[in-house]
Image (cartoon, helix red, strand yellow):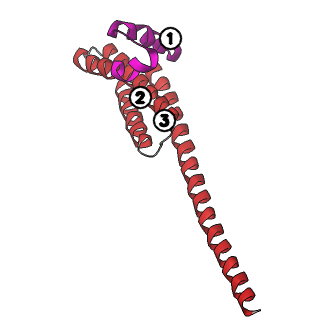
Amino acid sequence: MKKKFLFTIGIFFIGLVIGIVVTVIVIEQCGKITQEIGSLLQLAEIDLLVDSVCQTNEYNSAVILQEYKIRKIEDCENYIFDEEKKEILKTDKGIAHAKLYIIYNKRGEDKLARQEYNKSFILLRDRYKLESEDELQNIIEMIKNQNKL
């Protein structure tokens, strides 16, 4: 009888420990998902701000915001491990560099514009199957038209 009681108590504690471990894992995953969603929403908000600022010809502010967005994307890359989401972030980062290219180009800063163009090409070439830098111009024209830059 005593063995059955001890066995029952042992099983109870094992179940309790397993329940606690599972709960901790679920809470941790929920925290990561919440952080991920918050970061992605913040990136979308930055995009809206950049578009609004560019429409007022405040290009210095647009550069600051776009560079901030790139840093936020890089932060996200550190804790997002899903390959599909990483690919989306890489594309978003490439588009951010393309927007910087457009802004620097409008300001007449050819050297900085060229650097951003090259960064954009490297990030977007796989996603859009770009074979030459000239093909990036089509994407840049779409970005200009879509965002009224």
Q: 7 and 96: which one is in front?
A: 7
Measured Cα–Cα span from mark 3 to mark 2:
15 Å
Give the main secondary structure of the magenta stretch. Answer: helix
Nearest to the eye among marks 2 and 1: give it.
2
Residue at left 57%, top 47%? 33
* Cβ–Cβ under 8 Å for marks 3 and 2: no
Question: In the image, 3: left or right of 147?
Answer: right
Measured Cα–Cα span from mark 3 to mark 1:
30 Å
Nearest to the eye among marks 3 and 1: give it.
3
Q: Is residue 55 above or below residue 85?
A: above
Question: Which residue is situated farthest in the right direction here?
Answer: 1
Residue 135 spot, x, y in % from top left: 39, 7
Residue 79 spot, x, y in % from top left: 45, 46
Residue marked by disc 2: 93
Quarter placement of the C terminus: top left
Image disc number at residue 83: 3
Q: 75 and 9: which one is in front?
A: 9
The earlier-in-sequence mark between 2 and 1 is 2
Q: Amino acid at mark 1?
A: Asn
Question: In the image, 31: left or right of 54?
Answer: right
Residue marked by disc 1: 145
The earlier-in-sequence mark between 3 and 2 is 3
Q: Amino acid at mark 3?
A: Glu
Residue at left 61%, top 57%? 26
Image disc number at residue 108: none
Q: Amino acid at mark 2?
A: Lys
- The segment highlighted magenta reads 120-149
Q: 118 and 61: which one is in front?
A: 118
